[in-house]
Every structure is written in structure tokens, then in C-alpha cells.
Amino acid sequence: MLISSRLATLVLASFLASFGCHAQAPTKTPVATKLETGATLPPAVAYRVEILLRGKAQLPPASTISIGPVEPSDVAGFHTINVTVTAADKSSHPIKFLLSDDGKTVAQFIKYDISADPRTIVSDAGRPSRGGPASAPVVIVNFDDLECPFCARFHDSLFPAITQRYGDKVHIVYKDFPLDQHPWAMRASVDVNCLAAQSPTGYWNLVDYIHHNGEDIGSDPNAKPDDPNTKPDAPKHTLDRANAQLDKLTREQGAQQKVDAAKLDACIAKQDTSAIEASKQLGTTLNIESTPTYFINGEKYEGALPLEYVFGQIDDALRAQGTTPPPPYVAPAPPAEPATPAPTK
């Protein structure tokens, strides 16, 4: 609601600035107030609060302001009041303000709890990992879509560079976030997780392969583009072929890792998406809308950002954990242009 948003965005600085520019005319009888918890604001103080809020939020004349009873506050010298605005038969949610104990100052601020370790914002528990152990000073959790071309480029370039630079100082895990517009992404997520249940190594090998060869998933390996018998409108990729190829790749990787083939086959056939949907729901609660989206010790980043920028964020996270990062990253120089031969005479 517009009224609510206008009030909710008031901050202490704007109040202080407004007092300096728009001083109210002094009254003949100064307000002498001492707020008490549970009491209703004295009419003179309530009136001053209402005048201030109407002016700051530009409320329509027909609106009404309701001020709740005085409540205790964690801020010394202040109590709390809750303000509700009603206009056109619609009411805002209660908006919290601070009111000084003498009734002369109104303030608003947002309080955040930062006591929890940011690394725990997104759990890495139960996921196959790369790099260092779960106790590593930096934990990176990436929400991945196996059919996403941006994820593929991100996976092929950034994460090998991270493990090469930081070694066991960084712990990397992937969570599933297959997008609805990618038809075989869910199948791929289910299959790689079937393999992960028995072989973390097999999981990463398969993730590597799918990301590196995603453009070929679903294509006909026997198709010959120059064959005159090939129909020009024949689809180059189909969902049925993609699903069959993903299942085949999963079984082949499972055989290489010597997993229980019957158990793997049963998991592939079941295609249980519940764990994938739970991962997607977690991503939604974290306001993830695209992939890749990843968290470095709880701080959110989106898209394939420049390598030197990501390294800088990891370096900062290491310092915050009391760990010295590697020497500053220096991007390699671009290859030299070949010399132009001198013209012959």
C-alpha cells in the first residue's frame, strides 16, 4: 500500500533534517510529558506526531491515523508507538516508531540481528562437495541449473579457477534450481542426485560432463546434416532423446564408480523430484530468480561475474575468518598481436 510504504521509509536522518528546516512555532504552554508503558499518548503529543507523519508521508486529507499505546523499547531514552493509517477503507500494517521519553523526538530505524554466522544462512549439509572440508573458512553454495548455458560457462571457468587458487580454504557445494523453461533440467537434477547418493565423485564427474556438453543433450548422434533424406524441419533436439541420454550417462558413470546398479536403476526409474522441489523452494525463499546464483559465506551473488571480482569477495571472506588470502590476483596479459612483417622492396 502506498501510504504504508511512504511511512515505512521514514528514517531518523530525514526527521532531524526536517526539524532544522521546518521549525514549529512554539506554543504558549510547553508539552511536559513522561511516557509510561501501556499508557495512551497525551492528546498534544499525539497531535504533534500526526502532523509530522502527515507532512512527511503526504497523506491524503481524508486519511486517519491511529496511534497505539506506548510500548517499551530497547533504545535507551525512547519508547515505541505503533501507527496505523486508514484511507479509502484500507488500513496499513502497524508501523513502528520511536518516541523519546519526554515526547519531543520521533525516530525510526530498522533493527537487524547479525549474531548468527552468515555461513549458516544457506546450509551445505548433505551435498557432495569440492575443494576443502565443511570446516573450511569459506563456503560457497551455488544454485545450479544443468541445462542453463550461463551456468555451464560459469561452471567450466570459475570453479576450476577457485579450487586452483584457494585449495582447501574453500568448500563448494551445488544445490538444484532447475528452471521451468528448461525441459530436461529437472531430469538431469534427479539423475545426478541418484548418483550422488552412492558416489560424490560420480556426481561431480557427471555434472562436469553435462555442463560441458549440454548443447548436445537431446540431439540425434546419428544425424547427418548433409544427408538429403533428413527432413529440414526435423527437430535437432527432443526431450525424449535428452531423457534417454541423461539416464544412459548416469548409468555409465555409475558403472565407472562401481555403485549398486540395481539401486541406481530404481532411483532413475522412480524420478522422485521431491528433494529437487525442496531445493527450489529454498531458493525461492532466498529470492533466487535466475541461475547461476551463489552464496559466498552467506553473501548472495548473481550471474557470471568477472573472475577478479569474485576472487576479491572470497579474499574478503577469508580475512573475516582470520585467514590470510593468497597474493593479489593479477589477470594474465592478453596474447601479443603477431608482428606485421615489413613490406618487401
Image: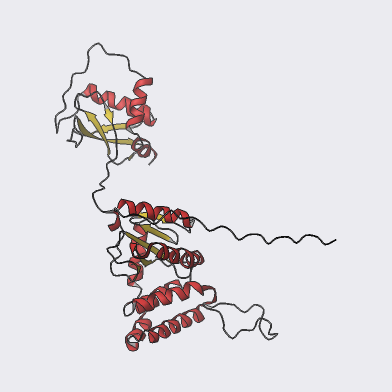
Colour scheme of the rendered structure: secondary structure
Question: Hey, which residue is sitting farthest bottom in the picture?
Answer: 262
Residue at position x 26%, y 33% in the image: 66
Q: Position of residue 13 (x, y in %)?
A: 34, 30
Residue at position x 40%, y 65% in the image: 163
The front one of 114 and 11 is 114
Residue at position x 50%, y 73% in the image: 212
Question: Hey, which residue is sitting farthest right in the picture?
Answer: 345
Q: Position of residue 114 (x, y in %)?
A: 26, 48
Q: Where is residue 134 in the image (x, y as percent from the top left)?
A: 28, 65
Q: Which quadrant is home to the N terminus?
A: top left
Q: Where is residue 294 in the image (x, y as percent from the top left)?
A: 39, 59
- Total of numbered circles in the picture? 0
Q: Could you say which quadrant of the image residue 187 lies in? A: bottom left
The front one of 309 and 98 is 309
The front one of 135 and 264 is 135
275 left or right of 232 in image: left
Q: Which quadrant is home to the C terminus?
A: bottom right
Q: Is residue 179 visible?
A: no
Question: Hey, which residue is sitting farthest front in the picture?
Answer: 345
Residue 338, relative to residue 60: is it above or below?
below
